[in-house]
Amino acid sequence: MNKSEAEDILIQVSKDSRLQEGYQGVRLIMREILRGETVPIHDISRATGIPVPVVSATRRELEKRKLLSRKGGAILTDTGIKLLNSIGIFDTEIPDFNCQYEISDTVTKLASQFDELTGQRPSPDYSLDQSHATSLTCFKRVMYFHQSDSIEGRDIAILGDDDLTSLAIVLFATRFGLKINSLTVFDIDERILNFIESVSFKLNFQIGLKKIDFIGEIPPCYKSTQDVFITDPPYTVEGLTRFISVGAEMLKERTNGLGFVSFSNLIPVENARLFRNIASMGLSPQEIIPSFNEYVGAQKHAGISRMGKFFSSGYLEPTNPTSRNLIYTNSKET
Amino acid sequence: MNKSEAEDILIQVSKDSRLQEGYQGVRLIMREILRGETVPIHDISRATGIPVPVVSATRRELEKRKLLSRKGGAILTDTGIKLLNSIGIFDTEIPDFNCQYEISDTVTKLASQFDELTGQRPSPDYSLDQSHATSLTCFKRVMYFHQSDSIEGRDIAILGDDDLTSLAIVLFATRFGLKINSLTVFDIDERILNFIESVSFKLNFQIGLKKIDFIGEIPPCYKSTQDVFITDPPYTVEGLTRFISVGAEMLKERTNGLGFVSFSNLIPVENARLFRNIASMGLSPQEIIPSFNEYVGAQKHAGISRMGKFFSSGYLEPTNPTSRNLIYTNSKET
């Protein structure tokens, strides 16, 4: 098999499995399997950033073509290995090059305390694209916010908080003696607001709680009031754009501010569209960290998402409100 | 002093020192000084991502207002500390939360070998915004490229290579038995092409060498030929946009590809403009790593820059060629 034939096969596999990352995506998946040998599908999804159902479809197409077989996980056949060789990929031993965050024991303890406090939390409402970040993820977030000067003395807004990041912030700030100026949770889901209220009462910390639907224009009293917005929005480009736009509107004009957005992998063309939207609002992308957030349970995106940090530039152009059926994944699919 | 008065002072400091990051930037600088006590100006610049001359101007303005004094570095006065306290920042001990890459001994050895081979390299031509990345940075880059599936079997283009990243790629690939399909360096500077040629001859690896000025339209024979483009372009938004656009045009349409861009910190409004340009071309920002690259010697940006990884989405809209005086920093300033 020559290089061009091998490429044709992988392009066809991507088409038949509707893998929108195309040739590059199939390469990534097969390379991951070559390196790891029998690899569970969720691990492939995590390592490649491609959603589980798509990895699964690709695996089926590779199986059909006898490039892959299943033996307690995915494993390449001899033909599969030869195909990779023909495009230049061999089974070589190279040290991984990944960036690792260290979590101190103090913070791990805070995460346990968080788990105890939140044992009775409301279960995720999938119609609102809710899914819970792990407690360690909540504290990674808080440490990242603090490292980015976004806790001390700040007016902080959380746009949608089924993850209960607000409570992690309170535990962290209390433990380390950080003074927050104000912390407000905006959510459409009353169960979450009530739960946060009850726990914050135990912690003796006042969190502002506002029931709001971000579909519509936000009340003027919420605009230009915050230093920091934090959100883990619905998964669609429209949902992400709308939540980020609301966050940007909430940032103070006088002193500007920062936004932190947790968002899952999008296919390149959609991700490019998202960043065009974000940059057109006048938000400046400062950092994007893949696989920063982990979620409880098995989801579409293999339970991981990215963290993005954005600065407001003082030239805000908010987007228009968007209709509900474009925002939430479930509404979109039905 | 109350919070609002303190904010007013910091806003005024940012105006008087032309710190375009505004209030947030002054806060970051003062916070860094509070944490580190007597901090050299280059360290402040690195930690905050704000260019050295601007940090320097801000320091002068803070000194004028007796918020800061200089005792072998910058140190806050009592008034300065009180001002920070009034906006909620205290001197608290919190573990740093930074992501660290591990560099193996094998790779450190390769970097020494690289240093020996490149001892006679041409010195930087500042009129072309050249400045040399450290040898370790070159290998960090190569490891990152490899981790991102961008070395094996790839057609790789480097757009401007005064850093000699091409030679680091060759050393790394040889050491670990990786097969590159092709490696081409495009540069306007003949000194660099000649130097790379002479070293690649010693290494017994053929690197394609093309003299080209990216100001104009690129020849059609260079379009859609590459899997990967790598660039560390001129510092202006126009320079960055032009080089990235050329890189995007070089990526194969049939199989798409990836781009790696090293770029220094821009003020938020300029950075937002850059990302609007990039996303409008159809490139998808996948990862942004602050302070990834380090450079030799003291420069405007404290010798660090970011690494960005971009996927092509298959919907390419290249930008128009840009005139020279908008691209290079020196031409722009004169």
Image: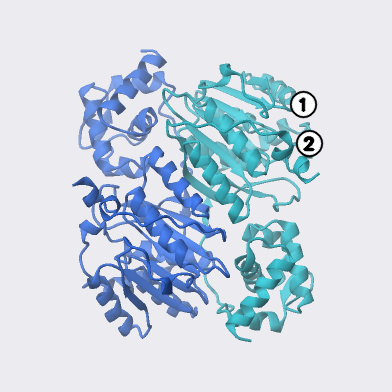
Chain colours: A cyan, B blue
Disc on the earlier residue, 1 or 2:
2
The label on residue A125 is 2
Badge 2 element: loop
Secondary structure state at the residue bearing disc 1? helix
In the rendered structure, the answer to whether residue A99 lies left or right of residue B240 reads right
**What is the quadrant of residue B37 in the picture?**
top left
Q: Position of residue A267 (x, y in %)?
A: 63, 55
- Residue lying furthest right: A334
Horizontal and vertical percent position of residue A276: 52, 45
A294 or B123: nearer the eye?
Answer: B123
Q: Read off the residue under disc 1.
A: A191
| Circle 1 Cα neighbour tier, 10 Å, few/some/many (<14 / 14–19 / ≥20) | some
Residue A333 picture location, percent across and down: 78, 46
Residue A73 visible somewhere in the drawing? no
Which residue shows up at 42% across the image and 75% down it? B221
Q: Amino acid at mark 2?
A: Asp
Label 1 and label 2 in one chain: yes
Q: Residue A150's x, y, as percent?
A: 48, 32
**Above or below, A219 relative to A304:** above
Direction top: furthest residue: B1
Image: A257 above or below A181: below
| Nearer to the camera, B64 or A22 | A22
Instruction: Give the residue type at disc 1.
Output: Arg
Crowding near the residue tagged with mark 2, few <14, some 14–19, many ≥20 C-alpha atoms within 10 Å = few
Tell me the subunit letter for badge 1: A
The answer to whether residue A60 shows anywhere in this view is yes
Choose between A250 and B88: the one closer to the eye.
A250
